Image (cartoon, rainbow, N blue to C red):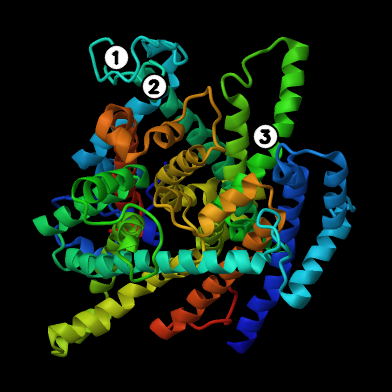
Amino acid sequence: MGVYVVKRLLWLPFLLIIVSLVTFALLRFGPGDPVQIWLGQHQNDQVRERIRAKLGLDDPFVVQYVRYMEGVITRLDFGESFQFRGKSVREVIGTRILVSMQLNLAAVIITLGIGIPVGLLAALRQGTGWDNLIVAIALAFQSLPVFITAPVLLLVFALHLDVLPTSGWGGFFSPKIIMPAVVMGVPGIAIVVRLVRASVLDVVGQDYVRTARAKGLPETTVRYRHILRNALIPVTTSFGFILAGLAGGTFIVEIYFGIPGVGRLSLEALNARDYPVLMAFAIISTTLFVIANLIVDLMYPYLDPRIRLGAGHVA
Amino acid sequence: MLPNRSGLPSHEHGHAHAPDGDPQQPDWSENELAAGQVLELDDRPIRGHSYWSLAIRRLFRKKLAVICLSLILFMYVGALLSPLITPYDFRAIDLQNTRQGPTWAHPFGTDRQGRDMLTRVIFGLRTTVIITITSLLGGTLVLGVVLGLMSGYMGRWVDSVIMRTGEVTSSFPEILLLLIFVAAFRPRLLVVVQQFEDATGIDWLIRLGVLDFTLISVGLAIFGWFGMARLVRGQVLQARESQYTEAALVMGASTAHILRVHMLRNILSPLIVSISAGLAGVAGAELVLSWIGVGVFPPVPSLGRMLFENGSPQVLMNHPHLILFPIGTVTLLFFCFNILGDAVNDAFNPRTR
């Protein structure tokens, strides 16, 4: 078990080097000069050259890459942002990530909080009208793209009813979070409902459930201890990806609702050719992805004692 | 397709022998099958009920799924034939009739520049359809299946290399990398293609969006093949251990023969399930990319771009047709994808029955 975790974590640095190298190469290969964008119309070749030299943009590719990665590895220093002059990337990204995380957390609470009980309900009423109705409604909501839910909600709740603020960010407990969180959380409900439903149906047919019922356990015990717990195993897989996505931004929702999160920042950074910020994004999201996957793998044996890590080959 | 040989102890074959609603075998309820029982098979040959014909029959029994499948086919064919069936030119500007609501002349109304919305929606759909097909069928499917087969069957270092590469590609932050990818390659390729167009006299590569389609499809395929490859690999690992593969090996079958006959046929049904589930994902990615502004560039119409331009509450209030028709098309397409994906999963995936 310990060996398994160490093995997986040792793989992380290699991944990070490849991901950062590819990102760095793509950024440098692409056209656009951050200094030119930054100076705008007040062009002065001398000034531009001086700034480029100061930022080290004229050095060979390898030198630039090694210098950047050295800062990241030794001091966790992602450099200074090009577009927000005088601010470190850590500073710029740190606040944005916190915003995106809170928003995503709110969305996940909506998704799982509604999805799991509804999925369980659908499965326990399998084959009845309820089951079909629930699945159909969930599917309909999943098919509604953010592109329509966002403006419709804005129109109804902000413009017509005037009960919710239109946009902006006020923290986790501000009513401003409600609309974006709903828009983000609702499409996922269908996925959770179907996952939980399918998985519960699979478990219900297992021998141990029959045994549990046969030995006279109360129905609630059977449902929660035998059915739900086993049925949630596949759900945890998607939960891991939800975790990885927590720090990731959602471009569309953040732009629609004017939320200063990661998604918007990365678009701004791309337009300004803010290389250090984009590199930091690539590195941070890769790390989170790997760690989230690891957490999922570690959660399996806890939920299902039949699964042993590190035994045999790991697919 | 798969021949019915009785007595093989594999689950899939077991299912192949349980035709739904066959009056002669009344007691094999679906739940008992799901519990993974090995069926006691007799040697009676069952004619005309291959696994495939059963699966397809199960699929066609669901009316909603059939309706959705027909709608998807209808939209796909319509989109691909768009230059032939659209009433107007998608670039034809008519400044006298801007932002008109639906009329007989313009069933979906006209946009800010008086262009016919119906035409633009159909052409936008064509963009989505072309990218879905090239990226999913061309890229993900070919890459995923070939690499997955190699990885699973050859094992050893081939397996390691492919799996590790896949882990790298799948751990990239996808949309961000696609953004950077397009931003890096498009301007450079644009110059190259322009020179090529000037040199050869071909003038439709950029105008019709061939460049954009290729770039996005390649980008999506690079970051999307691994899921498919892992699925195929898992199936191959299972099939490789089976007795029929061993038998084929003993009889001296070549690697290519085993891969084609024993592996590929066994992975077909999970493959179909995965493709039908992946359709919506690719289409969605194209929408998001175009919405952000790095997907398909004007003048090529794209639904994502239309949604971006008209996605404000003000438009929804004052000129609702500008957003409701594109969004209705998108929603209908996605709803059909989802229903079809579910139905296909129920029909082809032996584990869900």
User: Can you tell which quarter of the image residue A126 is in?
Assistant: bottom left
Q: Amino acid at mark 2?
A: Arg
Secondary-structure class at tag 3: helix
Q: Nearer the viewer, mark 2 or mark 3?
A: 2
The C terminus of chain A - image quarter: bottom right
What's the distance in space between the residues labelled 1 and 2, CA to CA? Answer: 14 Å
Marks 2 and 3, how far apart in space? 28 Å
Going from N to C along the chain, the mark reached first, 3 or 1, is 1
- The spot of residue A312 in percent (x, y) is 59, 79
Q: Is residue A156 above or below residue A263?
A: above
Q: Residue at x 57, y 38 (%)?
A: B294
Q: Chain of mark 2?
A: B
Circle on res. B265: none
Q: How many marks?
A: 3
| Left or right: B123 in relation to A201 | right
Under mark 1, the amino acid is His
Specify whether disc 3 shares its chain with disc 1: yes
Residue to which mark 1 is pinned: B106
Q: Which mark is residue B186?
A: 3
Question: Element at badge 1?
Answer: loop
Q: Is residue B91 visible?
A: yes
Amino acid marked by disc 3: Arg
Q: Nearer the viewer, residue B208 or A30?
A: A30
Quadrant where the N terminus of chain A is found in the figure:
bottom right
Q: Residues within 10 Å of mark 3 (few under 14, many from 20)?
A: some
Give coordinates of residue B209: x percent, y percent: 57, 24
**Same chain shared by disc 2 and disc 3:** yes
A31 or A84: nearer the viewer = A84
User: Around disc 2, counting alpha carbons within 10 Å, would you say few (fewer than 14), some (14 to 19), or many (20 or more)?
Assistant: some
